[in-house]
Image (cartoon, rainbow, N blue to C red):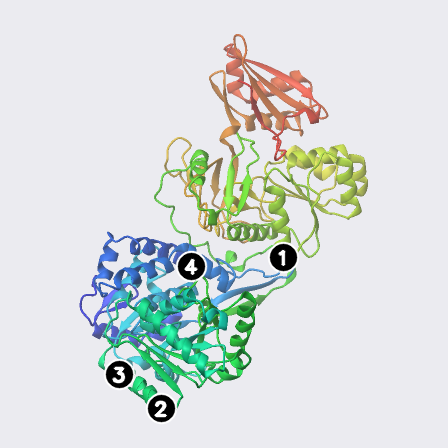
Amino acid sequence: MTTSVDHPVLHLWQGEFVDDAEAGRRLAGLPELAGQVLGRPLPTDVVLGACAAVSRSLADPASALYGRLAGQLPAAEAPAVLAELASALTREALERKLRRELGGLRPERLTRPDARETVYEAWAPVGLLVHIAPGNAAAVAPLSVVEGLLAGNLNVLKTSSSDSALALDVLAALGAADPSGLIAERVVALRFSSARRAWLEAVCGPADAIAVWGGEDAVRAAGELAQPGCRLVEWGHRISFAYLTRRASSEDGVLDALAEDVCRYEQQACSSPQVVYLDTDDTGELFAFAGRFAERLAKVSDGHQAPAPDPAEQAEITTVQQLARLEQHLGLTRVFAAEDGSWRVLADTRAALDASPLHRSVWVKPLPRHAVTATLRPMRRYLQTAAIGGTRAEVAELSRAVFAAGVTRVTPVGSMLDSYEGEPHDGVYALQRYSRRVSVRAGDADFRTVPCLDDLVAPPVLPPAPDAPLLGKEGVQRALAALEPRHAHLHFRSGGSTGAPALSVFTCDDYDNQMRAAADGLLAAGFDPARDRAANLFYSGGMYGSFISFFSILERLNATQFPIAAGPDHAMVAEALIAHRADTVFGMPSYLWQLLHAESDRLRAYGGIRQVFYGGEHFTTEQRRVLTEVFGVKVIRSAAYGSTDLGPLGYQCASSDGSVHHVLTDLHTLEILDPREDRPVASGQPGRLVFTSRARAGQRLERYEIGDLGRAVECTCACGSTVPRLELLGRYGDVVRVGTYFINYRRIVRALEERLAYHGEVQLSVAPGTDREQLTVRLDEQYAPDPDLTRTAVTTDVPEVASAVEEGLLSLAVQNVRRETFERTPVSGKLRTVVDLR
């Protein structure tokens, strides 16, 4: 296998550099290769991760990749070209592109665009996509292939045999950055002359789409090679212009900015101005403006080194300029040119759009605004960018006029060559041109709890966890101080149930992506937005996110919802539930437990609460029994497993029991580490849950130790989903050290539930004593047994407590108290399971 591309006849074939003869042999098998490769899906997350790694190398002049590529470019151009590539390949830029063009970060997944219907849609690859790259823009070839990869295609790139190997090296680096091998198998890059007709036919014959960059001849040649049904994506040459109102044309700052647009890249870009239109029909005004603009262009041009045109280009410049000088005698034109030939302004009284010979050659023409559309429309196939100088109202008016003429892009004067992330190219989105929209209409009964068809097929392909140190809550808070404002849109505070409330920050796009993922999880849990009537009873206010989040989740499901929120007036809440015929409630278990008991008679008489979706805490087995037998609840299920800082982490499907959840792998990578050492646990063993957020632009948390314990559930889920599952086993905070022993809150709860059938809430209080520490078990007096029975159950089933009492290290007390006296966190309303008063 060859590992470098120093020889000019080498090609890149699925991660391997091969010579001309080997590439020729393999071309015959291209149709079969497409059938093999396209059967394996390429998750966009794989492409994003590889591109981010290559972007970091391209931004580092000390990297081997940077040095290799810089050596293939003219020294003056290398920094700008590599910076352009590095910027375009960042995860942030590509995520924005995916959201803008395909509607989300995982457009390849078959999900329900309307959750009320079991109709699934996705963006699928067009198939075998051929890219015929231009020879005058080094970054275009690799970036076009990246777009093809984001759309999931098998990509064949054709570059000229005279081009450098820059594109091949970039694409090889992308393949090497992907441990799954999915990227490498989807890239074939060939360097050969267009005169090799047999190779062109072998490449284009089986193509499902051909993306061609170039002029009319190149597009026409590609069209002749395309088979019927093949999609031809034209990225042809375009003409751009500036349009100035009278006021704008009188401002030196505007003219200087326009001159900068002319000088940048010697007008080689499609968005460079070749013509300047003036809002006038007065010849004298036109020539006077051309003279003033020539003065400003001369000044600006002096600050830019002008590379000499090649002989053919110089011949065209000379011909156009001499013809314009001849027409001066007819009063049609006037020429203003530099003595050294570095620039020229060609004033022409005829409004028709003319192409410029480039190299700082600019036509100046009259065009009253009322004639803009009619005058320019005959050239609509070639128009691209218009820079408009004028007032706000004039920019708005003239934008509509030039769009009607065929222009696809309007910019301020001075920024014609600038772009923004996600900007359409030539009036279309590339990713949509490289994709197909596909759909599946499924039967309601069998698919009602299936949010994504892909999850029924194979486990998700996930990148490995990053090689980074573990991150704790303190590290997250420290990192916030350096977070850029553009990444800090939404601010939430945690409930503070395990300590002081902490701040978490999201971009609006991050938040939307997370809410959509959580909404899919709620479908899997059995919530039916077409039929269920949901009451949001989570806590709101104080920058706490649960109420707002579930409002957003239900909104994205097009569900019927009543945003009531948790409140102390239980009678008012119960009245609202009954009045609006709510049959599904969302909230914290502790609040829902209080509400149902405070308004027991009224709600039992109503009998309409069929489903309870909870978050933040868990109902015990005995509490579930009461909800089912006493209140008639049919479904009791976790609404989501998540945290304020990471967002939604998992979901329960309709087949999940207890604290078992599927992991939201679209958002996170999960590791389960040994409770005492930073190493993975054996399969199915309990450990610390460590998450890496992958779909987050701003506060991207890597290897975040959330504070929960859990284990992987290895067996296949009865719901049919292949998405990994975990069983939550409590929090580190559930274990408290008292009297030298570590005592687990969950074991005490389980002892009371199993021995005494207790189904109320349990709170532990730890306080210092004069000679020993005191552990108090506080129970709900409505359900509490005799204190002596409680004490016996705890000391019998929790040996650590029994040993500490026997050794005189701990005194154990039991209190049966009113439900409202339990201590709760003020923001979220969660029960404080352990109150440490020491």
What separation in Å lies between label 2 and label 3 (alpha carbons)?
Answer: 46 Å
User: Distance from label 1 to label 4 (Cα)?
Assistant: 33 Å
Q: Is residue 684 left or right of residue 8?
A: right
Q: Nearer the viewer, mark 1 or mark 2?
A: 2
Task: Check disc 1 and report the residue beneath it.
Answer: 448
Q: Whole-percent x and y of residue 18?
A: 23, 68
Residue 653 visible to an observer of this rendering? yes
Determine which quarter of the picture holds residue 167: bottom left
Quadrant of the drawing holding the N terminus: bottom left
Which one is closest to the eye, mark 4 or mark 2?
A: 2
Q: Secondary structure at mark 2?
A: loop
Q: Disc 3 vs disc 1: which is toward the camera?
A: 3
Residue at (34, 61) in percent of width and height:
84
Residue type, mark 2 in image: His
Q: Spot the residue most to the top.
A: 771
For residue 547, above or below residue 151:
above
Residue at the far bottom in the pictured view:
330
Toward the viewer: 433 or 341? 341
Between 173 and 794, which is closer to the camera in this rendering?
A: 173
The label shown at residue 94 is 4
Distance from Cα at disc 4 to Cα at disc 2 = 55 Å
Identify the mark nearer the N-term, 4 or 2. 4
Q: Which mark is residue 329?
A: 2
Residue nearer the viewer, 573 or 458 = 573
Q: Is label 4 in a helix, a strand or a loop? A: helix
Decide if residue 811 is on the left or right side of residue 288.
right
How many other residues sit within 10 Å of disc 2, few (<14), some (14-19) or many (≥20)?
few
Which residue position holds label 3? 195
Give the amino acid at mark 3.
Answer: Ala
Location of residue 231 with respect to 759 vertically, above or below: below
Crowding near the residue tagged with mark 4, few <14, some 14–19, many ≥20 C-alpha atoms within 10 Å: many
